[in-house]
Image (cartoon, rainbow, N blue to C red):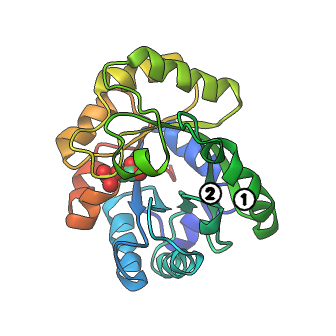
């Protein structure tokens, strides 16, 4: 693990470059911190442990109950304890804060609600520019069961066996110019996205595949990584037992600073 100064030098200016560089040496682990689940101070402590455990970035977001102030306080606390890039994972334009390094500028592609596909993005884009947050364009695809984000996002969730539909959405994301595609089973999902779906999507697209939702054990992390996930996202499991991150991180790129 580099000293703080080294890591800052490495990624300051472009979180996209940091991620792409990291992926050259292997898959990455991102830890999702939901500002609604604990106070800012605790979030900062979690981020510090996540970095020590070998995680590669911190995502900040959640499906319900967030205000700009809660997000801001959490991001500030995380940045004071940890030098990893902090990437917003916003539910809406309301969650954009200039203290973050980047934002997954995402479209919930399989939503029934136009607002989730392009509405919030139109509201948020001028703010992203004004605040100087780096946008990371991402196609967000919700897979069964979808959990809270499936409901709030009014998603037509992709059935777990409908690999073909997942591939079609992922290809559409790539062809629309998105830099990432995210297969989301939903936070707290009883089962993560099926490995055969991850594999088929990874084989079809040339952009990095992010996989999250229900990755609660090292075995499940391994399942997603073996299937070809480029980035795994862990939220709930880290909230319950932050020590689980170390074994998950050991399966990913040892260092993005090589
Ligand atoms: C949710 O994919 C993330 O958006 C993480 O899910 O909380 O189940 O780890 P978990």
Q: Left or right? Give the position of 112 relative to 195.
A: right
Mark 1 beta carbon near ligand 1 (under 8 Å): no
Tell me the residue that label 2 is attached to: 103
| Vertical order, 200 against 18 (above or below) | above
Q: Residue 227 or 13: which is nearer the viewer?
A: 227
**What is the x, y in percent for residue 8?**
59, 67
* Label 2, label 1: how far apart the Cα atoms are: 10 Å
Tell me the residue that label 1 is attached to: 124
Instruction: Say if residue 242 shows up in the picture.
Output: no
Q: Earlier in the sequence, mark 2 or mark 1?
A: 2
**What is the x, y in percent for residue 219?**
18, 40
Mark 1 Cα within 10 Å, few/some/many (few <14, many 20+)?
some
Badge 2 marks a residue whose secondary structure is strand
Q: Residue 210 or 226: which is nearer the viewer?
A: 210
Instruction: Classify residue 5 by image quadrant.
Output: bottom right
For marks 2 and 1, give the one nearer the viewer: 1
CB atoms of marks 2 and 1 within 8 Å? yes
Badge 1 marks a residue whose secondary structure is helix
User: Residue at 48% of width from left, 81% of height from top?
Assistant: 77
């Amino acid at each position: 693990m580099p000293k703080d100064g080294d890591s800052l030098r490495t990624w300051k200016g472009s979180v996209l470059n940091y991620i792409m560089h990291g992926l050259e040496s292997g898959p990455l682990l991102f830890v999702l911190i939901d500002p609604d689940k604990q106070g800012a101070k605790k979030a900062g402590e979690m981020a510090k442990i996540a970095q020590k455990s070998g995680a590669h970035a911190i995502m900040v977001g959640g499906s319900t109950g967030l205000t700009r102030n809660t997000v801001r306080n959490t991001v500030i606390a995380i940045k004071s304890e940890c030098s990893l890039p902090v990437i917003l994972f916003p539910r809406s334009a309301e969650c954009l804060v200039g203290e973050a390094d980047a934002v997954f500028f995402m479209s919930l592609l399989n939503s029934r609600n136009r607002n989730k596909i392009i509405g919030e993005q139109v509201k948020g884009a001028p703010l992203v520019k004004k605040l100087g947050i780096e946008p990371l364009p991402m196609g967000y695809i919700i897979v069964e069961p979808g959990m809270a984000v499936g409901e709030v996002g009014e998603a037509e969730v992709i059935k777990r066996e409908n690999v073909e539909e997942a591939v079609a959405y992922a290809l559409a994301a790539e062809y629309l110019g998105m830099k990432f595609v995210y297969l989301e089973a939903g936070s707290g999902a009883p089962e993560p996205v099926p490995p055969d779906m991850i594999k088929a999507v990874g084989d079809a697209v040339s952009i990095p595949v992010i996989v999250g939702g229900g990755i609660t054990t090292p075995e499940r992390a391994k399942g997603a990584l073996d299937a070809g996930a480029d980035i795994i996202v862990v939220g709930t499991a880290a909230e319950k037992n932050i020590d689980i991150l170390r074994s998950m991180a050991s399966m990913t790129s040892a260092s993005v600073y090589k």
